[in-house]
């Protein structure tokens, strides 16, 4: 399954069941090339965790470029 989140429009997330009740989420920012990968039993929880991770990544990128 591929999905996008409205609050993270440049990110594309893929969730696949890698084995019985074990899911792998990968996400990539189409602008910066940044990525995340998570594994767990609940795909909805993985998406929530990915959202939090991406927000932290975006904050770090923003701080890095605002220092220049």
Image (tube, helix red, strand yellow):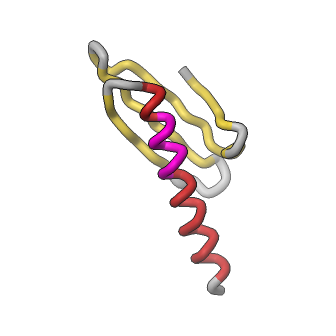
Which of the 4 image quadrants contains residue 5?
Answer: top right
Q: Residue at x 64, y 47 (%)?
A: 30
On the picture, is 13 further left or further right than 6?
Answer: left
User: Dividing the image into 4 quarters, which one contains the N terminus?
Assistant: top right
Q: Is residue 21 above or below residue 23?
A: above
Give the image location of residue 54, x and y in percent: 54, 51
19 relative position to 51: left or right: left
Q: Which residue appears farthest toward the top when viewing the image?
A: 20
Quick one: 15 or 30, which is closer to the camera? 15
Assign the magenta stretch its main secondary structure. Answer: helix
- Residue at 28% x, 17% y is 19
Looking at the image, which residue sits at the far left? 20
| Relative height, residue 61 to residue 17 (above, below) | below
Q: Is residue 11 above or below residue 20?
A: below
Residue 8 vs residue 14: left or right?
Answer: right
Magenta segment range? 47-53
Q: Residue at x 54, y 68 (%)?
A: 60
Instruction: Residue at 45% x, 46% y: name it.
Output: 36
Image label count: 0
Q: Is residue 22 magenta?
A: no
Seen from this angle, which residue lies furthest bottom? 68
Q: Looking at the figure, which quarter contains the C terminus? A: bottom right
Q: Position of residue 39 (x, y in %)?
A: 33, 34
Residue 53 is situated, as x and y percent measured from the top left of the image, at 48, 51
């Amino acid at each position: 399954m591929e999905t996008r989140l409205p609050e993270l429009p440049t990110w594309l997330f893929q969730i696949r069941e890698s084995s019985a009740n074990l899911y792998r989420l990968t996400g990539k920012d189409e602008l910066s090339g940044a990525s995340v990968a998570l594994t767990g039993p609940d795909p909805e929880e993985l998406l929530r965790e990915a959202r939090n991770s991406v927000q932290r990544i975006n904050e770090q990128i923003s701080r890095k470029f605002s220092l220049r």
